[in-house]
Amino acid sequence: MLAFLLRRLANAVAVMLTVALIAFVIFRFVGDPVEMMLNEQATQAQRDALRERLGLNASPAMQFARFVTNAIQGDFGISYRNQQDVFTLIAERFPATLELVLVATILSLALGIPFGVVTAIRRNSVLAQALQLVSIVGISLPSFALGILLILVFSVQLGWLPGFGRGEVVDLGFWSTGLLTASGRKALVLPSITLALFQITLVMRLVRAEMLETLRTDFIKFARARGLPDRVVHFRHALRNCLMPVITVTGMQIGNLIAFALITETVFQWPGTGLLFIQAVTFVDIPVMAAYLVIVSFIFVALNTVVDMLYAVVDPRLRMQGSGGGGHGG
Amino acid sequence: MEVDAMTAPPTPAATPPARPGLLARLADSDLCWSLHRSPLALAAGLVLILVSLAALFAPLLATQNPYDLAQLDLTNAELPPMWLEDGQAAYALGSDNQGRDVYSAILYGSRISLVIGAATVALSLAIGLIVGLSAGYSGGWVDNLLMRIGDTLLSIPTILVAILVTAVFRQLLPPGLREAFSAIILVVAISMTNWVQYARTVRASTLVERRKEYVQAARLIGVRPLRIMIGHILPNPLTPVLVTATLNLGLAILIEATLSFLGIGMPPTEPSLGTLIRIGNQYLFSGQWWVVVFPAAYLSLIVLAVNLLGDWLRDALNPKLR
């Protein structure tokens, strides 16, 4: 048990070190940091001083070690573009992204689960067929195209909802939220639908597959044999058994959604980390790019690792890699 | 189990290697029969054929060459589609602020999107097959190293990898060359994220097959490793690889469009469908919806057709589902 947890943790650390190495290589070798930070008139002495201060004269291995220790402490250097501390810059923008991602996640569960149940238990109904078709369309429709379409219909034509920005934001000191004002909530509607669409189809397909699997099992047959009404069989017995994988996938997808939010944020000019990253890419603001890569990958890897480890705690079968399974039934 | 007894005995569904009468056998195959039974897949295939033909013959079908600035006429700028008031027949789907015909731009744009998509699938397939075969066949540290690289790539969100690779390559190239090479950069960047899937499939199959007697026999009579890998082992995982490749074509077109939309893909001088949507997006609030809606609809249509075809192919080639 402990061995498995440690191995999984070591694996995650190895991946993060690789990511940090990629970020470091990008930071150090794509363009000279000294040239990027100083203007053209800087003297050679100034250049040398900065080079020394940034520690660029040390050996690459030493530089990488310093990069990692700094990153762990949240120090990703200064943005080339607006001369601010990169970590603060990202931290300021993070609430916007996280709020968007959480609302999209709630939306995907609230719509995806019922859709999935319907397509599973009324497999041949018109509604189920229609939902299946919509789910394929949902996967094929590029999220930026959906966002543009929503803006066109609901902002430009109908004028019901704002098409860009976050609306009024309440600053709670450590967190700025748009959920407390009417304009903030209105501004959330279109972006969260755009971000959630793919996730909805994912949850729906997953619930459908799991439901079809569960409905075939013996305990469902037994429940039916006991004469329980369909509603109880479907929702209390079958659906409950499907929720575990749904919650897992949803949890793991949060990291992915944070990354994919950058497309939505660009469409809606949503002031989150994704928009910051895209602007950094356009202006070759390498410290911001490197920091974003490390932070998003960290969230992604951490979520995956925690989910894997929780699974191992909950389900003993996963711990036994190759060493013949014990007598656990199910 | 009861289900199995009722269906036809499973037969290998992949098309056999070229032998006399290939077309006749193809028409008689399970695959073709299944295609007849699925109107949606048939329609998707038809759409794809039409789209490819339209892209291929774009110079003949288009009313103007959108790359040729001399053909653009500012007096015909911002025209709505022809069925609306002020629309002109020469600009069937309207024109943008520079007098570029939207219909022609879409035809030329789909060319770029499709070529990049196809090239990405080809490149990632090539990398994936080579990595998967060599990792599975040689095992040991080669296997470890290659698969670890794959794991790491998969542990970062794909869109991030694609954006970073594009950004880094662009930065490394001298400014004058960036636009000329943007298509190649995109193909490399998207392939970087796509090859792992193929490599994993092929490796898993190679690990199983290389222990079987026919491979050992081939090795004993002195067949070279390269030939064993390609001639003996590779045909085994080809079916799932084919399905993945189809679905990845849709994905590749989508990622290319996304990168172009974000402004780090194809430049406006050589617009793909994603670039057209990016350009059109700037006029969204000024009411010129046609500049953005038509390219977006065409892009969605292509991806939808590819996905429908891929979904159908996956089910049709899976004997368990018959």
Image (cartoon, coloured by chain):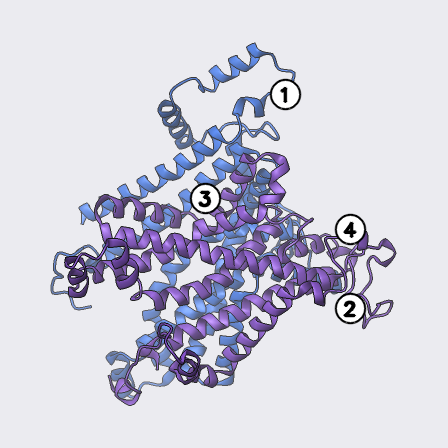
**Dot 1 crowding, Cα within 10 Å, few <14, some 14–19, many 20+:** few
Residue named by callout 4: B69
Q: Is residue B56 above or below residue A89?
A: below
User: In 3D space, how far apart are the residues under numbered discs 4 and 2 (Cα atoms)?
Assistant: 19 Å
Residue identified by numbered label 2? B92
Viewer-side residue, B202 vs A17: B202
* Residue B261 percent coordinates (x, y): 62, 52
**On the same chain: label 3 and label 4?**
no
In the image, which is nearer the foreground, mark 1 or mark 4?
4
Q: Is residue A122 left or right of residue A163?
A: left
The amino acid marked with disc number 4 is: Leu
Residue A159: tell me if it is visible. Answer: no
Kindly indicate whether the residue at mark 4 contacts the one at mark 3 (C-beta within 8 angstroms): no
- The image position of residue B156, as x and y in percent, is 42, 47
Chain B's shade in the image?
purple
Q: Check contact, mark 1 vs mark 3: CB within 8 A.
A: no
Q: Residue at x 63, y 53 (%)?
A: A267
Output the chain of dot 4: B
Q: Give the tally of numbered discs.
A: 4
Residue carrying label 1? A39
Q: Chain of mark 2?
A: B
| Mark 2 or mark 1, whichever is nearer to me | 2
Are the residues at dot 4 and dot 2 in contact (C-beta closer than 8 Å)?
no
> Taking B70 as reference, is B299 left or right?
left
Which amino acid, by three-letter code, is at mark 2?
Ala
Q: Quadrant of the N terminus of chain B?
A: bottom left
- Residue found at x 55% / y 38%: A92
